[in-house]
Image: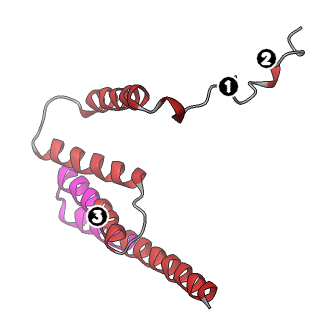
Amino acid sequence: MGHNNQEQGSVNRHALTKKLSAISWGLFFIWVGISLITHVGWGMGLLGVGIITLGTQVARKYFGLKLEGFWVVVGFFFVLGGVWALLHVRLGLLPFLCVAVGVALLVSTLVGNPGDSVSPAQEGGHPLFQRGLTD
C-alpha cells in the first residue's frame, strides 16, 4: 500500500513539474511578445525574463520541488542585465561577469572539503599512466 502511495506522489510531482514548466514558458513568450509590441527596451525585457525565471524557482520551492541552481543563476543574470541596462551603466557587464565567475570557481575550490574531490591516482588514474603501460 505504501508503495502505491509513493508511486502516486512521484506521478503528482512529475505532473506538477510539467505544469510549472509549461506555465513558465507560457509567461516567457507572453512577456517577450508584450515587450516587442510595446517597445519597452532591453532593460525592462531582460528584467521581466529574470523575474519570470526566478519566480519559477520560487514556485518550485513553494510546492516542495527541488530548486534548479542553473535557472536561479540564469534568472539572477537576467535581472542583473536588466537593471544594468535600465540604469544606463556605461561599463560593460561581461568583464564583471567573467571576474565573478572566476572568483566563484576559485572560492569553491579553496573552500571545499578536502574529501570532496578525488585525484586521478585515487581512482586508478588514466589508463595511459597506469603502471605497465608507460614502461
User: Dividing the picture into quarters, in which one does residue 104 lie?
Assistant: top left
Q: Please report the bounds of the magenta region as a residue range.
A: 25-52
Q: Which residue corresponds to mark 2?
A: 129
Residue 35 at x, y percent in the picture = 23, 63
Residue 46 among those drawn in magenta: yes
Nearest to N terminus: mark 1 or mark 2: 1
Does label 2 or label 3 sit earlier along the sequence? 3
27 versus 3 height, above or below:
above
x then y, percent, for residue 120: 67, 25
- The 10 Å Cα crowd at callout 1, few under 14, some 14 to 19, many 20 or more, is few
Pointers 2 and 3 in contact (CB under 8 A)?
no
Callout 3: few (<14), some (14-19), or many (20+) C-alpha neighbours within 10 Å?
many
Helix, strand or loop at disc 1?
loop
Name above or below for residue 64 compared with residue 119. Answer: below
Residue 4 shown left or right of residue 16 in the figure:
right
| Amino acid, disc 1 | Pro
Quarter the N terminus occupies = bottom right
Residue position for label 3? 52
Compare residues 38 and 122 and report the one nearer the observer.
Answer: 122
Task: Tell me where residue 53 appears, x and y as whole percent.
Answer: 32, 60
State the SS at label 2: helix
The tag earlier along the polypeptide, 1 or 3, is 3
- Dividing the picture into quadrants, the one containing residue 95 is top left
Q: Circle 1 sits on which residue? A: 120
Q: Amino acid at mark 3?
A: Ile
